[in-house]
Image (cartoon, grey):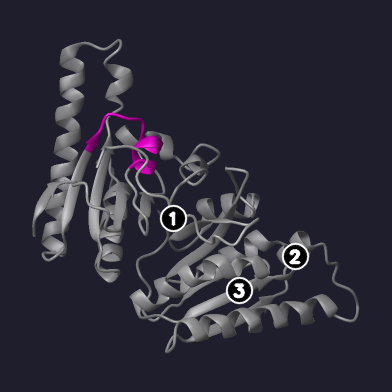
Amino acid sequence: MPTRPSDATQDPRTVVGVDGSERATSAALWGAADAEAHRRSLLLVHAADLDRLDRFASFETSEHLRDAGNSVLTTAAEEIRKRFPELEVGVKLSRRKPIPALHASVRPGSTIVVGSRGTGGFGPLLLGSTGLEVVIGSPAPVVVVRGEPERENAPVTAAVRDEHDVRWLVRAGREALARERALRLVNVHSLFARFDGTARDETGRAADRGEKLMADLASGIRESAPGLAVETEVVEARSAASALVEASRHADLLVMGSHERRGVSVLGLGHVVHALLHHSRCPVEIVPYRRDDESGVVEEGLRDDEG
């Protein structure tokens, strides 16, 4: 398997942040499997933050961190080589801070993958308010790898809010097809009511509307992806977060959307996203999309000339 510095071509790739920690290694292996499933290349990124350190640290300190970063990348690439001998792997030692380093490395059609916790070069990816920064403003979907190992025959599960989700659900369908899994659409009543202003009454009209929404979305996905098995479920729960955490117990991947408004990423699911990044039993993918126009999933290219 060739291992090389990243090049300037614009083919989609899976970008993984690595720092030498056990969870980052797990994320790199998950990212390698993702790249193989989607027939993309893999780029391992380590952020050494040398742009900042060079202003006040000694030359020896900067060189030590550069050498340590290269060692982390080499070790991660060698481990992936053992497991995925045919996969094309690139490595990049970035001079930037972790989040800008990841955002600058994506291309249209790419995915960013990180572990649920990090040390060293990706310490800022500790989950919580800081961990959400890698999602906020991301030019590509972000996967946080956590939970249990891959579950055999478990579906890719998509958390549905409203009709606007059609703009990113095609992404969830592609994930399911690549993994040869079914796609399961889950709508939680409290979440649905919260975002469209509907209050569920004794007649169950909100429930009926939820069922119709799910049926319409499923029909559209089946038309765009013939052969994909699509399941739907409307869940009654007081807490959307707890319902989706429970759903993650039976999922291979949980996919959610976040929408862009006036150039600033707004996490439409708010505390639900936060709860899942802390408690999900499977990897979570957050897909950015624009809610106020027809452009769909945000698919920006490289932000600079880092490669």
| Label 2 sits on residue | 190
Indicate which label's residue lies in the foreground, 1 or 3. Answer: 1
Distance Cα–Cα, label 3 vs label 2:
12 Å
Q: What label sits on residue 186 in the rendered view?
A: 3
Q: Residue drawn 12% across and 58% down?
A: 81
Residue for point 68% across, 68% down? 162
Pick the residue in front: 95 or 30: 95
**Upstream in sequence: badge 1 or badge 2:** 2
Q: The N terminus is located in which quarter?
A: bottom left
Measured as percent of width and height from the top left, residue 49 is found at: 31, 27
Q: Position of residue 210 (x, y in %)?
A: 73, 77
Whether residue 103 is in magenta: the answer is: yes
- The part of the chain drawn in magenta is 93-104
Quarter of the image where one finds residue 233: bottom right
Q: Is residue 250 visible?
A: no
Q: Amino acid at mark 2?
A: Ser
Q: Amino acid at mark 1?
A: Glu
Question: Residue 38, located in which quarter of the rendered image?
Answer: bottom left
271 sits left or right of 6 in the view:
right
Mark closer to the observer (1, 2): 1
Mark 1 lies on residue: 299
Q: Are marks 1 and 3 in contact (CB under 8 Å)?
A: no
For the residue carrying disc 3, how many other residues have a C-alpha within 10 Å: few (<14), some (14-19), or many (20+)? Answer: many
Q: Is residue 172 above or below residue 50?
A: below
Callout 2: 10 Å neighbours few (<14), some, many (20+)?
Answer: many
What amino acid is at disc 3? Val
Q: Label 1 vs label 2: CA separation?
A: 30 Å
Dot 1: within a 10 Å radius of its alpha carbon, few (fewer than 14), some, or many (20 or more) residues? some
